[in-house]
Amino acid sequence: MVKEMGKRQIFKRQQINFMILNLIAFTIIFSIFGIIVFSQVQRTLFSQTDEELMRFKEMLEEQAVTEFRLPSSNMNLPPNERLRNEPNPRIIVLNWNSSGKIMNENRMGTLFYESYLQDYQLDTSTVDTITNMSVNDAYNFRYLLFKDVNENDEIAYTQLMINIDAEKTIIEHFGELLIICSSIFIILSISASYFLSKKMMNPIIHSWNKQTEFVENASHELRTPLTIIQNKLELLLTNPHEKIMDKFENIALSLSETRRLTKLTTDLLTLARADASETELVKTAIMVDDFIEKICEPYIEIAESQNKHFSLNLNTKTTIEADETRLHQLFVILLDNALKYTGHGDYIKIQSSVSDNKIVIDVMDTGVGIKEENKNLIFERFYREDQARSRETGGSGLGLSIAQWIVKKHNGSISASQNHPKGTTFTIKLPIQG
C-alpha cells in the first residue's frame, strides 16, 4: 500500500511538471502572438498619419513658403491627384522663429493658442523625427519638426501636428480586448495543459507498470532455479564422502535448473536488446520450404519417440530475405510449444502457402489448446495460461514474446487461433519482398 502511494505521488509530481511546462509554453506563445498583433495594429494605424505628415512637409519644401496655399490649377486635376496634393485638414502648422516663439498664433485662433499652446516649448532635439506629444494630458498629437528651407523669412522651424486621439482610442480598446482574450486563452490553456499532461503520463505509467511487472516476474523466475540449485548443493555438502552415483538425482536436477536458468537469462537478454533496438537482422536469401523441412527433421524424430504424428504440407517454393538465425529461433519456439502441449496420439502439422504476396505458415497441433479469452494475452511477457503445467515443462512465458518480436522485425504478423476439433494454430505471415 505504501509502495502504491509512493508511485502515485511520483506520477502526480511528474504530471504537474508536464502541466507547468505546457502552461509556460502556451503562455509564451500567446504572449508573443499578442505582442506581434498589437505592434502590427499600432504600426498600421500610425503609418497613415506619418505618411500624411511627410507628404505635407514635401509640399511645403517644394513651395518654399511660410503658409500653404492651394494653387488654383489644382481644381482642374483628377480627384486622386488633387487628393494627393491636398493637406489633411487635421494637420496644424506651427511656425517657430530662432528664439523658440510661435509666429503664426493669430492664424490658429486665439482660443486654441491660449488654451493649448501658450506654454508649449520648442524641442529641437526631435528635428526630422516623427514624435508623439500630449497637450494638457487630454489630447494626443503626432508631430514632425523640420528646419524651414526659405531663407527670406524669419521662420526657423516648421512643426506639423496631427491629432491621433482616434488612433489612441482604437489602440487602447484593442489592447484591453487583447488582454481579455489572452486571459481567456491562458485559462483555457490551463485546462489544455492538464489534459495534455494526463495524456503524456499514460504511456509513461504503462511503461512503468510493464517494467515493474517485468522485473518482478524476472526476479521470481530467476529465484526459483537458483533456490533449487542452492538447496541441492548444500545437501551435497552435508555428505562430502558420498559417491556421485548416490547423489545422481540431486546433481541431475541441479544441471537441469542450470540449463533452465541459462535459457531464461538468454531470453531476457534477447528481449532487453529488442527493447533497446540493439539487435539488427542479418538478412539472406532463404528458400522457405527447404528451411522449414530442415528445422523440422529432429522434431519429427522426437514426435515419433513420443507417439505423436508430425506432418508437413509445404507449397510455397518461394525465396524470401530473412535473418536465418532469428527465423530458426522462431520455429524452435513454436515447435517446442507444440511438443510440450500435445499428448500421445496428438497431431502436429506445418503447412505453407502464398497469399497476397506473403508467405503464410501455419503451425497446428491438436494439444490442450488456448482459451478464447486468452488469445490476446499469450504474447505478453511471462504470461502462462496454465502456471502449473508451464512449471512442469520448464516454460518461462517469454518464448512467444520473442517469437512476436522476430516476426515484427521481419515486417510480418503472428496470431493464434483455435484448431479444430481441438488444439491451437499459430499463423505467421511474412512479406516476400524482404
Image (cartoon, helix red, strand yellow):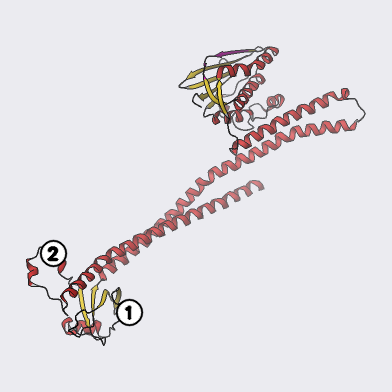
- For residue 23, the mark is none
Residue wearing tag 2? 81
Q: Is residue 38 visible?
A: yes
For image coordinates 50% across by 49% down, the residue present is 197
Q: Residue 210: x and y, percent?
A: 60, 39
**214, above or below 92, in the image:** above
* Farthest residue, direction front: 151
Query: Does 94 sit left or right of 238 as displayed?
Result: left
**211, above or below 78, in the image:** above
Which class describes the residues within 10 Å of circle 1: few (<14), some (14-19), or many (20+)?
few
For image coordinates 66% across by 39% down, the residue present is 215
Of helix, strand and loop, which one carries label 2? helix
Q: Nearer the viewer, residue 187 or 417?
A: 417
Residue wearing tag 1? 125
Q: Nearer the viewer, residue 89 or 283?
A: 283
Q: Amino acid at mark 1?
A: Ser
- Alpha-carbon span between mark 1 and mark 2: 35 Å
Q: Amino acid at mark 2?
A: Glu
Query: Does 38 sit left or right of 433 as displayed?
Result: left
Q: Earlier in the sequence, mark 1 or mark 2?
A: 2
Q: Which residues are magenta?
A: 310-318
Q: Residue 389: x and y, percent?
A: 69, 24
Query: Does 306 sit left or right of 285 as displayed?
Result: right
Q: Is residue 315 magenta?
A: yes
